[in-house]
Amino acid sequence: MIAKLILLPLLATLSLASPVHVQRDAQAGKRIRSLASPNLCVTVQNGYAAYGTRVALTACSQGSNGDGYLDEFQYWSVTGPQRGQIKLSSKDYMCLDAGDESNGAGITIEACEDGKDSQIWTVGTTGTGSQPNLQLSVGSAESQCLDVVKDSTPVQSKPYGSEKDAQVWSCHTQDGNTADAIQQFFELATADE
């Protein structure tokens, strides 16, 4: 009888609780690695994934060959050419977002919203083989691309900093690997690559 009296209020409060988001396997997807700086990967900054958190390029996690402490911030749902949202693998309700999609707009992670133009990415190939060069354009016009800010400098912060900033910029063609064009080309990598 006493147990029922104790359990009833507890059960009542549980019925009002918020839904739980299940944490996914951080390595379920792939890392997005820069061709301009092959040791850098697209990474959620600040050491936690929260809506509005900046996305930049940080040294690629060592994954299964090291401690992999950045895995949950570097693995994305993209596994090859596609069109749609790019979700953070460890929190599949958070998506890569290009904001207002204008030149220089920063990249953040935001709540995934079906049909939101700034979250619709077209991942297209520009090469051949098992690791073709990829360009990530955003929105229905596909005229703005994920871009590494060429002359950006490291930002020191805890628990880790970024080496290069990420932004959207008018898409370049891969014409002779010019310094500007190469900033928009990426490859997908797993923990062992």
Image (cartoon, grey):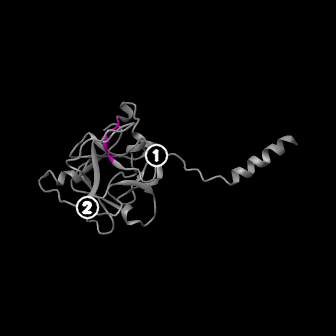
x%, y% of residue 126?
22, 56
Q: Which mark is residue 104?
A: none
x%, y% of residue 117?
37, 66
Q: Which mark is residue 103?
A: 2
Kind of residue indicated by mark 2: Asn
Task: Residue 39: name its quadrant.
Answer: top left
Q: Residue at x 23, y 54 (%)?
A: 184
Compared across the picture, whether 39 is left or right of 20 comes to left
Q: Nearer the viewer, residue 103 or 73?
A: 103
Is 57 in the magenta? Answer: yes
Q: Residue at x 41, y 50 (%)?
A: 53
Image position of 130 with respect to 101: above or below: above
Q: Give the mark nearer the N terminus: 2 vs 1.
A: 1
Q: Nearer the viewer, residue 176 or 1?
A: 1
* Label 2: few (<14), some (14–19) or many (≥20) C-alpha neighbours in 10 Å: some
Give the alpha-carbon distance from disc 2 to disc 1, as whole Å: 29 Å
Q: Quadrant of the N terminus?
A: top right
Q: Residue at x 42, y 53 (%)?
A: 52
Is 67 in the magenta? Answer: no
x%, y% of residue 41?
31, 44
Q: Secondary structure at mark 2?
A: loop
Compared across the picture, whether 37 is left or right of 176 comes to right
- Of all residues, the one furthest to the left in this rendering is 176
Chain part drawn in magenta:
56-61
Residue on which the image places disc 1: 90
Q: Secondary structure at mark 1?
A: loop
